[in-house]
Every structure is written in C-alpha cells, then in structure tokens.
C-alpha cells in the first residue's frame, strides 16, 4: 500500500518525505485554504512547490462543476508538472471529464466517492485513482472501511486498473485496516503515519539496551 499525505502544508510534506516512506500527496480546496493559499496564481505555484518536495503523484483538484470548465482547468493543472494528477468530483460531468482525460493519457483521481456504484463508474471512466472517503462515512455512523472492502471485491472481479486510494483517513488504525483490506494507497495526516512507529515495548526495550551498554562503559 502506497503512503500519501493529505495536506497542503509544506513543512509536513517535507517531514513525511524525509522519513523516506512518502509516495504522494493529496490536496483539496479546503486544505489549500487552511494553509492560507488563495488566488489561482498562488494555488498553481503551491502545487509546483509540493511536486518539488515529494517523489510521487500530487492530486490537484478542479473547482469547476461543468465538463468544459473541468477540461480547461484540468489541462492547465496537468501541464504544471509531470507529477500532477487531476482530481475530479464524482458527479456526471466529472465522470465525463475523467473519460476525456484518460483517453488523452492524463491521470485522474475521482474524489468524494461514498458508494461502490460510484467507484464502479470511476473505474469504467478510466480513473487512475478512486478516492472513497472513509472518515466522513464513519462520521455519519456508516462503516467506511466496509466500503474499501466492497470496492476491492468489485475491482478484483473485473481486474480494473483503477487504484483504490483510501481517503479521509483520520488515524493510524485506519491505515492498518486499509492495508489489511488491500487498499492500493492511503492518504492521511502526518500523525496517522507517525502513529505506526509507536509501541511502548520498543521504547522500554531501547532504554534497557542503552542502560546495559552504559553499565559496561
Ligand atoms: C482526499 O483526497 C481528501 O482530501 C481528504 O482525504 C478528505 O479528508 P477529511 O474527510 O478528513 O477532510
């Protein structure tokens, strides 16, 4: 399972990249706004800055909701950097734009996916990635992880190439459960990745090793 970080914060992206396990970045308009990145020129520059930090795919989301607008925006985004993946919403025109981009060899990420049916459509339209939002399903008392399992089954039945990018990952157990279920990628906050490091027996064991070494020196 590939590890993506879900942020537009350059310091956190650098930190994850320095750890040596980062394989991509996802952003969305809310994450950009959270970092105070506003205005088209600043947003485009920020995508390039992110691409220059990470070795891997960087999802850049369109804000148009009509086919023509998505195509125009997506072409500008894709031309920014070879690592850019055009992120499109799971609406009718988003599916049409996905098909258009896949026929041109431009990579896509279909976002805001909350059902198996939507994931099936994304795959049929040739999406590179499909992003089921597990945390937001959990937020409304629906089992987000079950959606990952169902999409995995459907995609495996027909050997679709579309990669399941488990999104809206909120914590470390989501990361582990997504890996168990066979998600191709997960995107979450830096804390969800760093949580994987933690075990009290590791800390206790290391302290003991160092204490014993120091006894003899
Ligand atoms: C995915 O690409 C989205 O940016 C993201 O995972 C949404 O997560 P949230 O539900 O925590 O906002």
Image (cartoon, helix red, strand yellow):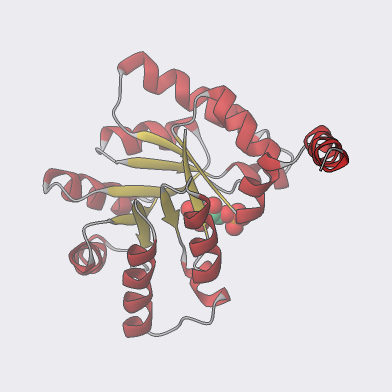
Q: Please tell me whether residue 209 is drawn above or below residue 84 in the rendered image.
A: above
**Residue 85 percent location from the top left of the image:** 30, 54
Camera-side residue of 169 and 127: 169
Q: Residue furthest left?
A: 104
Residue 62 visible from this viewpoint: no
* Residue at left offset 20%, top offset 65%: 68
Quadrant for the C terminus in the image: top right
**Residue 177 percent location from the top left of the image:** 63, 29
Q: How many marks?
A: 0
**Residue 203 percent location from the top left of the image:** 81, 40
* Residue at left offset 24%, top offset 37%: 126
* Residue at left offset 31%, top offset 84%: 41
Q: Is residue 213 left or right of residue 124?
A: right
**Quarter holding ligand 1:** bottom right
Q: Is residue 215 left or right of residue 72?
A: right
Camera-side residue of 210 and 154: 210
Q: Please tell me whether residue 1 is drawn above or below residue 58 in the rendered image.
A: above
Q: Residue furthest front?
A: 217
Residue 174 visible from this viewpoint: yes
* Residue at left offset 65%, top offset 38%: 174
Q: Is residue 40 left or right of residue 176?
A: left
Q: Please tell me whether residue 190 is drawn above or below residue 214 in the rendered image.
A: below
């Amino acid at each position: 399972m590939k590890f993506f970080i879900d942020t537009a914060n350059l310091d956190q992206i650098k930190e994850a990249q320095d750890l040596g396990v980062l394989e991509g970045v996802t952003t969305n308009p809310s994450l950009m706004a959270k970092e105070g990145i506003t205005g088209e020129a600043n947003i485009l520059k920020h995508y390039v800055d992110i691409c220059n930090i990470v070795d891997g795919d960087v999802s850049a989301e369109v804000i148009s909701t009509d086919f023509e607008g998505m195509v125009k925006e997506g072409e500008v985004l894709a031309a920014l950097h070879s690592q850019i993946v055009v992120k499109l919403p799971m609406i009718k025109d988003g599916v049409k734009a996905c098909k258009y981009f896949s026929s041109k060899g431009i990579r896509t990420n279909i976002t805001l996916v909350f059902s198996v049916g939507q994931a099936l459509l994304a795959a049929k339209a040739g999406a590179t990635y499909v992003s089921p939002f597990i945390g937001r399903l959990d937020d409304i008392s629906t089992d987000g992880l079950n959606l990952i399992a169902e999409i995995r089954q459907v995609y495996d039945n027909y050997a679709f190439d579309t990669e399941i990018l488990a999104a809206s990952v909120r914590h470390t157990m989501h990361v582990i459960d997504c890996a168990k279920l066979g998600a191709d990628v997960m995107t979450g906050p830096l804390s969800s990745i760093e949580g994987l490091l933690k075990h009290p027996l590791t800390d206790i064991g290391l302290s003991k090793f160092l204490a014993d070494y120091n006894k003899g020196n």
